[in-house]
Image (tube, grey):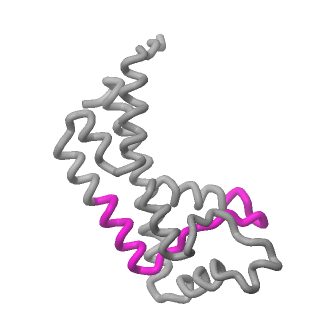
Amino acid sequence: MIERMSWTKFKRSLISMILTWLIPGIGHLYLGKKGRAVVFFIVVHLTFILGFVADGRFFLVDQRQPFMSYLQTATNMAAGPLDIVGRVYVYGSPAYFLPGEEEARSSFLMTRMRERMKSQGSAYGTAYLLTAGLMNLLLMLDVFDISIGRKE
């Protein structure tokens, strides 16, 4: 039988998930899991920084392959504000969509994207950036389970 969630549990789980998206590990701290909070904060941030330094790609939605590009971009976005800061640093703006074909020829965004792709560590950096986003998604699910009492 499925039990209805109380308003208090719902509010607590929603707050912890939002906090986790904003700063990985903070949702666990909100729920009183200090050790986990510190470890998760360090692991997700370190993974993101390694990906960024290794010239990982921040994916952009490409209308020619919408399904995969939406998944890749959403995975990057799961890292929270880290993703926004990274995009602004690399592309000059929080860009999430590829420019049209005419704009692409002279676009600063496309130039920066090509430069990062040519880097030797780009494939590894991209894997690290995607991993940071996926880990943060898992952390959001973890704080949800903890907040509703399914897990300690």
Who is closer to the viewer here, 60 or 85? 85
Q: Residue at x 35, y 51 (%)?
A: 23
Decide if residue 1 is on the left or right side of residue 109.
left
Q: Quadrant of the C terminus?
A: top left
Q: Residue at x 65, y 57 (%)?
A: 70
Reply above or below: 44 against 36. Answer: below
Reply above or below: 50 against 147. Answer: below
Q: Is residue 33 magenta?
A: no
Decide if residue 9 is on the left or right side of residue 62.
left
Q: Is residue 64 magenta?
A: yes
Which percent across, then down, holds residue 31?
Answer: 26, 33
Q: Which residues fall within the magenta stretch?
A: 43-68
Q: Residue at x 18, y 42 (%)?
A: 34
Reply above or below: 141 against 92. Answer: above
Which percent across, then down, holds residue 119?
Answer: 50, 88
Decide if residue 21 is on the left or right side of residue 32.
right
In this rendering, the count of numbered labels is 0
Q: Quadrant of residue 42?
A: bottom left
Q: Residue at x 73, y 85 (%)?
A: 106
Q: Return the residue found at the far right.
A: 102
Which percent across, then down, holds residue 69?
Answer: 66, 62
Who is closer to the viewer here, 6 or 91? 91
Q: Return the residue found at the far left.
A: 35
Which percent across, then down, holds residue 112?
Answer: 58, 83
